[in-house]
């Protein structure tokens, strides 16, 4: 009969926490890059061009409709090694690029929906005042859209944090890979994986609390 060993459970915390920096770095970098890409994709979705919209639709469907683990293996080991300037980069950077591509597809839909929620008359007013479309989006439409999109974007950030654990399958030394190595070394899978699960849970709860605080502040402001 398997007996839970508290010693291995508590001993796993320090080594796993030592990799928290990598996990957070991958999460933050992926989210920021995905956010920038999502804005570009959302703006492209407003362009009335059938060929462009067809390409965009396939692009978004590819990343939204396939498993993240399959995307990581394809891009980190298949696509990126074929691209000069990228193949020499570290596994962490390659994983960040892949995560940003994947999550930008979800965030683009969030931002696109927020843009469509802004009254079209405001863009027409910008054009009437002599602004270009880009100026109208930058100064009038996007600031309002971002406020509407904040709750969903916070959810995207949390999903990005949890999804970063998948980077361990391609060799990124994050909390998940460290836990796997400890478990394989000690054969105490229950203790080690419970440890890493609790750490992810606690950190996730911190992000959820921040999300609620931001939403309350934004709600009070408006």
Image (tube, rainbow, N blue to C red):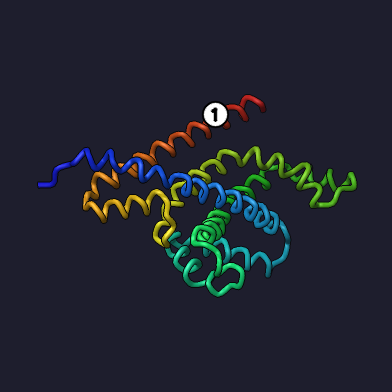
- Is there any visible trace of residue 159 in the rendered image? no
What residue is drawn where x is 89% and y is 44%?
129
What residue is drawn where x is 74% and y is 44%?
141
Left or right: 87 as drawn, with respect to 139: left
Question: In the rendering, at what x and y percent does residue 130 appear?
Answer: 90, 47
Q: Residue 164 versus residue 180: which sits nearer the camera? A: 180
- Residue under pointer 1: 213
What residue is drawn where x is 66% and y is 64%?
53
Picture layout, residue 190 above or below residue 82: above
Left or right: 36 as drawn, with respect to 72: right
Q: Residues within 10 Å of mark 1 (few under 14, many from 20)?
A: few
Badge 1 element: helix
- Is there any visible trace of residue 173 in the rendered image? yes
Q: Residue 135 versus residue 190: which sits nearer the camera? A: 190
Left or right: 50 as drawn, with respect to 77: right
Residue placed furthest toward the left: 1
Question: In the rendering, at what x and y percent does residue 113 appear?
Answer: 62, 48
Residue placed furthest toward the top: 220
Picture layout, residue 86 above or below residue 4: below
Q: Give the image quarter of residue 185.
A: bottom left
Question: In the rendering, at what x and y percent does residue 13 appear?
Answer: 33, 41
Residue placed furthest toward the bottom: 82
What residue is drawn where x is 61% and y is 73%?
84
Question: In the rendering, at what x and y percent does residue 24 appear?
Answer: 49, 45
Q: Residue 33 versus residue 64: which sits nearer the camera? A: 33
Left or right: 128 as drawn, with respect to 25: right
Q: Quadrant of the C terminus?
A: top right
Number of disc labels: 1
């Amino acid at each position: 009969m398997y007996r839970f060993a508290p010693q291995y459970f508590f001993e796993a915390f320090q080594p796993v926490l030592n990799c928290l920096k990598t996990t957070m770095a991958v999460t933050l970098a992926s989210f920021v890059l995905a956010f920038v890409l999502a804005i570009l994709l959302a703006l492209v979705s407003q362009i009335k061009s059938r060929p462009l919209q067809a390409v965009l639709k396939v692009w978004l469907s590819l990343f939204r409709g396939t498993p993240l683990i399959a995307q990581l293996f394809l891009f980190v080991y298949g696509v990126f090694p074929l691209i000069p300037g990228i193949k020499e980069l570290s596994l962490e950077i390659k994983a960040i690029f892949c995560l940003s591509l994947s999550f930008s597809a979800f965030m683009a839909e969030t931002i696109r929906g927020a843009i469509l929620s802004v009254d079209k008359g405001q863009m027409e007013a910008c054009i009437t005042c002599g602004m270009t479309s880009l100026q109208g989006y930058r100064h009038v439409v996007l600031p309002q859209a971002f406020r509407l999109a904040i709750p969903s974007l916070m959810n995207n950030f949390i999903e990005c944090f949890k999804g970063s654990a998948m980077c361990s399958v391609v060799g990124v030394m994050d909390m998940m890979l460290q836990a796997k190595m400890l478990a394989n070394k000690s054969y105490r899978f229950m203790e080690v994986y419970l440890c890493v699960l609790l750490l992810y849970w606690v950190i996730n709860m911190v992000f959820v609390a921040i999300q609620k605080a931001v939403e309350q502040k934004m709600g009070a402001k408006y």
